[in-house]
Amino acid sequence: MAAVCRNRIPNVRQRLMELESEFNYHPEKDTSTDFLAAYSAVNQGHCHPKIIKALQEQVEKLSLSSRAFYNDQFPILTEHLTNMLGYEMVLPMNTGAEGVETALKIAKKWS
């Protein structure tokens, strides 16, 4: 398996211990910088204090919901997105895969 996947697995032996902002604090080495940023998923930096605070506040109220239930924040988000993007409607998805699947269904239905 290792020989087959060799070109897909980077030869990096650096452990991620404690991340704050873009820095990795390692107990045995100097601080290093994370230039990968999880393929842009953490461009704001690891453990950003404002994001951690917002997450903690939200999870104390409601940790997960679906569109099967009303959420008072969803209309605020969609109004902000339509105004910002200049679209009449938006349909936010959780993942790129869901977005692509939904776009294909919409294209099939109205084409």
Image: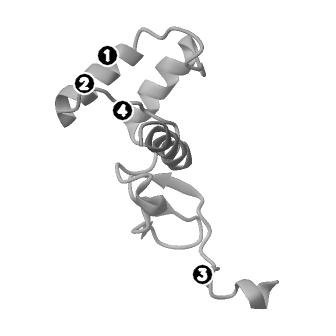
Residue annotated with mark 4: 50
N-terminal-most mark, 3 or 4: 3
Q: CA distance from mark 2 to mark 1?
A: 6 Å
N-terminal-most mark, 1 or 3: 3
| Dot 2 and dot 1 residues touching (CB under 8 Å) | yes
Seen in the picture, residue 44 relative to 86 is either above or below; the reply is below
Q: Residue 48 in the image: x percent, y percent? A: 39, 42
- The amino acid on which the numbered mark 4 sits, given as a three-letter code, is Lys
Question: Can you tell which of label 3 and label 2 is closer to the viewer?
Answer: 2
| Dot 3 and dot 2 residues touching (CB under 8 Å) | no
Q: Residue at x 56, y 15 (%)?
A: 60
Within-10-Å neighbours for mark 4: few <14, some 14–19, many 20+: few
Which residue is situated farthest in the right direction here?
Answer: 1
- The amino acid on which the numbered mark 3 sits, given as a three-letter code, is Pro
N-terminal-most mark, 4 or 1: 4
N-terminal-most mark, 3 or 2: 3
| Dot 2 and dot 4 residues touching (CB under 8 Å) | no
Q: Residue 61 in the image: x percent, y percent? A: 54, 11
Q: Which mark is residue 76?
A: 1
Question: Can you tell which of label 1 and label 3 is closer to the viewer?
Answer: 1
Q: How is the image coloured?
A: one colour
N-terminal-most mark, 2 or 4: 4
Residue annotated with mark 3: 10
Q: Which mark is residue 93?
A: none
Q: Quadrant of the C terminus?
A: top left
Helix, strand or loop under label 2 = helix
